[in-house]
Amino acid sequence: MSNLTKRSIWGAIYVIVMMGGLLIHPFAFALVFGTLLFFTQYEFYALVEAAGHKISRLPGTLMGVLFFVICFGVANSFLPKSLVFICIPIILLMFIIELFRRNHNTLERSGLTVLGFIYIALPFSLINFIVSSTINGQAHVYYPWIMAGIFLIMWANDSFAYLIGTQFGRHKMCTRISPAKSWEGLIGGAVFGIVMGIVNAVLFQALSMISWIVIAALTVGFGTLGDLFESKIKREIGVKDSGNILPGHGGFLDRLDSLLFAIPVVFIWLMLSGNF
């Protein structure tokens, strides 16, 4: 089996599982995305350890999943809204865990563990409020299509950035971080990402055309920064992928790095535009 065939098969499985979990049922969403969160945060901590740092990998990951589950309950009205603030004692607990460890790396371990929580668990947890928002005046309706549209924008941007960059890329964008990326690929991906946003406005009419275009611009812009951020981490450590759980694609962090930067700013836009 060629590498391209293997990559295509696993890419298709990944998309089917993710979109299936998102669209089938709220509890399927919680299961799939909670699992993705676990592996993504665990991979990030593995990268941190590969760089020679000490970290509380399993406690930090479990705390991230716990916060995701609580946000799921709040977003779907199973739990009171005030429980969102449990993120504060969770972060304090990460520091407290280090207080009782017999080591000399307290600041390093606690700081990097909290960084993984903020970098991975927080964006994943915010997705709960995007898929269970106020739609047509009905509060806390499970409406996965906004998130589905964000994924379509991301995939359109990534796919066409790769295709156009491969065929026409002449001017390298940031060789110090990601030698393969070009300005031509960036612009081409952005154009098709915006086009996908316009298509979303026709398909998913809970949001206006303007709102979808803004979401597309934010997803493309901050998604690119998220991709570059993870690329810089891997380049400094000297590894190609964050993991090997997806043959031909690397790890979950490699696939979701764009999402981690895009979701918080899209969430803020949806709040400011009155959709929550």
Image: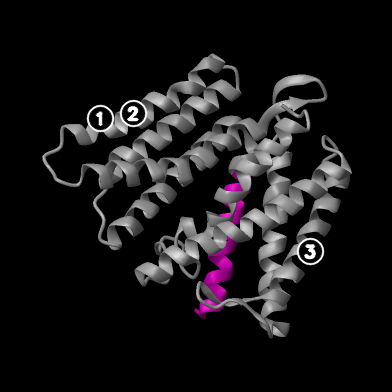
Question: In terms of depth relative to the viewer, which is nearer, 10 or 210?
Answer: 210
Q: Which disc, if any, is residue 192?
A: 3
- Magenta residues? 1-20
Residue type (three-letter) at the residue carrying disc 3: Phe
Q: CA distance from mark 2 to mark 1?
A: 6 Å
71 relative to 18, above or below? above
Secondary structure predominantly adopted by residues drawn in magenta:
helix
Q: CA distance from mark 2 to mark 3?
A: 43 Å
Dot placed on the residue nearer the N-terminal end, 1 or 3: 1
Secondary structure at numbered mark 3: helix
Q: Residue at x 74, y 32 (%)?
A: 272
Residue 56 location in percent, x, y?
26, 44
| Pointer 2 with pointer 1, Cβ within 8 A | yes
Residue type (three-letter) at the residue carrying disc 1: Ile
260 relative to 131, above or below? below
Residue 21 lies in what quarter of the image? top right
Secondary structure at numbered mark 1: helix
What residue did someone put label 1 on? Answer: 96
Q: Residue at x 15, y 37 (%)?
A: 101
Q: Is residue 116 left or right of residue 274?
A: left
Question: In terms of depth relative to the viewer, which is nearer, 26 or 167?
Answer: 167
Residue at the far left: name it: 102
